[in-house]
């Protein structure tokens, strides 16, 4: 979700990639569903592993869930590193409606933060106003 919002907001000002510490090979169906509600078609997107980028210059690393900041390696060229702790909706247990709402809440929070950050990257102020 964060990758899609950042990519859209940055408008090509930066190359955006997303990777996880334990990718499952597929995006969670709820992720595809709730992102579709915002007009993003993530069907066919494949999660990548963070180690796939160890041989590339990566200037900014942003981790978002759980202990990702603790397990994420340092990349060549890495200048900045941020950890913005969002609740991972995949950990929510409950009714279908409760799980859907958790994914929507995460989507909305990620959209707010990563759109502001991406707009800052696009206009050269880097982070914009994130609150």
Image (tube, rainbow, N blue to C red):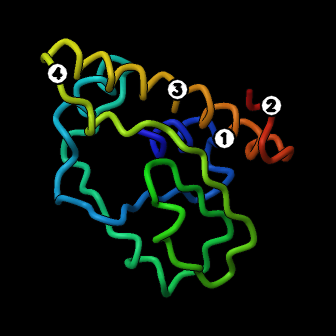
As measured in the structure, the alpha-carbon distance from the residue carrying label 2 to the one carrying label 4 is 35 Å
Q: Position of residue 46 (x, y in %)?
A: 24, 56
Is 123 situated left or right of 78 in this image? Answer: right
Element on which disc 1 rests = helix
Is 120 situated left or right of 63 in this image? Answer: right
Residue tagged by mark 4? Answer: 94
Q: Considering only order in the chain, which callout, 4 or 1, is on the residue closer to the N terminus?
A: 4
**Residue at the extreme top:** 97
**Residue at the extreme right:** 125
Closest to the observer: 31 or 5? 31
Element on which disc 3 rests = helix
Disc 3 crowd rating (10 Å Cα; few below 14, some 14-19, many 20+) is some
Closest to the observer: 65 or 18? 65
Which label lies toward us, 3 or 4?
4
Residue tagged by mark 2? Answer: 129
Which label lies toward us, 2 or 4?
4
Answer whether labels 1 and 4 touch (C-beta < 8 Å).
no
Disc 2 crowd rating (10 Å Cα; few below 14, some 14-19, many 20+) is few
Residue tagged by mark 1? Answer: 118
Kindly indicate the quadrant of the structure image that contains residue 98: top left
Closest to the observer: 17 or 107? 107
Answer whether labels 1 and 3 touch (C-beta < 8 Å).
no
Element on which disc 4 rests = loop
Q: Considering only order in the chain, which callout, 2 or 1, is on the residue closer to the N terminus?
A: 1
As measured in the structure, the alpha-carbon distance from the residue carrying label 1 to the one carrying label 3 is 14 Å
As measured in the structure, the alpha-carbon distance from the residue carrying label 1 to the one carrying label 4 is 33 Å
Element on which disc 2 rests = loop
Residue at the (60%, 26%) spot, across then down: 112
């Amino acid at each position: 979700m964060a990758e899609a919002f950042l990519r859209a907001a940055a408008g090509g000002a930066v190359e955006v990639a997303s990777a996880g510490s334990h990718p499952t090979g597929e995006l969670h169906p709820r992720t595809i569903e709730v992102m579709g509600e915002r007009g993003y078609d993530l069907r066919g997107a494949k999660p990548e592993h963070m180690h796939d980028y160890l041989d590339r210059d990566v200037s900014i690393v942003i981790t978002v869930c759980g202990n990702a900041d603790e397990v994420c390696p340092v990349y060549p060229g890495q200048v900045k590193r941020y950890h913005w702790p969002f609740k991972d909706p995949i950990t929510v247990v409950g009714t279908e409606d409760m799980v859907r709402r958790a994914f929507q809440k995460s989507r909305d929070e990620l959209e707010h933060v990563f759109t502001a950050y991406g707009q800052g990257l696009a206009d050269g102020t880097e982070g914009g106003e994130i609150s």
